[in-house]
Amino acid sequence: MPRITHHLWVCPFGHTNRDSFKVCSTCGFQHFQRSAQVAASERVVIYFNPATGEHRTPARNDLSIPEVYANQGFERREIMRMTDWEKESGLVHEATNFHPGNEAIPDEPLIPKPKPEVIRELVRDMADAIASGPFTGVENLL
């Protein structure tokens, strides 16, 4: 059974709702918007010049285009799908593609292997130690 958290919310028409219902108890306004698109506050914005193909990326997405860019022929453009923009522009969106955990997994894990001469040297040392006698005696420790 899901846990219900009761909270107070006000619909845009000013009706106060004291329960965590998904619709307003007075007017039926939906508390949670059902939209498949990216919210306007989270969309990536670029300034694109259709004549030259140049683009500029502003620091914030909630500002209108500056006059400097508007006079040069740039238009404000919202990117709805980052993969389409990557294909069109040839750029890579690092936050999407290189986020920790998105690294490519190699086909076979790389296991470090010692050099053959190191293995030969270790085998010789072990053979010499075994040939000298048992390892448990006190006389072998001195």
Image: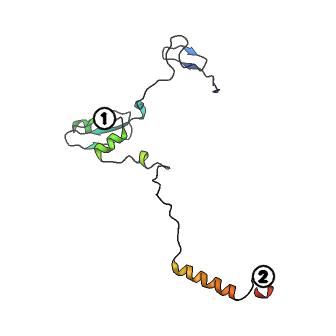
Mark 2: amino acid: Thr
Residue at position x 75%, y 82% from top? 135
The figure's colour scheme reads rainbow
- Residue 123 in the figure: left or right of residue 35: right
Q: Residues within 10 Å of mark 1 (few under 14, many from 20)?
A: some
- Helix, strand or loop for disc 1: strand
The answer to whether the residue labelled 2 contacts the one labelled 1, judged by CB atoms less than 8 Å apart, is no
Task: Look at the image and tell me whether residue 142 can be seen.
Answer: no
Q: Which mark is residue 136?
A: 2
**In the rendered view, would you say 72 is above or below 120?**
above
Picture quadrant where residue 57 is located = top left
Q: Which mark is residue 93?
A: none
Q: Residues within 10 Å of mark 2 (few under 14, many from 20)?
A: few
Residue at position x 55%, y 12% from top? 25
Disc with the residue nearer the chain's start (2 vs 1): 1
Tell me residue 58's x, y (percent). 35, 40
What is the residue that sits farthest to the top in this orientation? 26
Residue indicated by mark 1: 77
Tell me residue 123's x, y (percent). 60, 82
Real-space Cα distance between discs 2 and 1?
79 Å
What is the residue that sits farthest to the right in this orientation? 138
Residue at position x 58%, y 16% from top? 17
Residue at position x 49%, y 18% from top? 30
Q: Nearer the viewer, mark 2 or mark 1?
A: 2
Tell me residue 89's x, y (percent). 29, 45
Picture quadrant where residue 44 is located = top left
Tell me residue 67's x, y (percent). 27, 35
Classify the position of the C terminus by image quarter: bottom right
- Helix, strand or loop for disc 2: loop
Mark 1: amino acid: Arg
- Residue 60 in the figure: left or right of residue 56: right
Task: Look at the image and tell me whether residue 124 can be seen.
Answer: yes
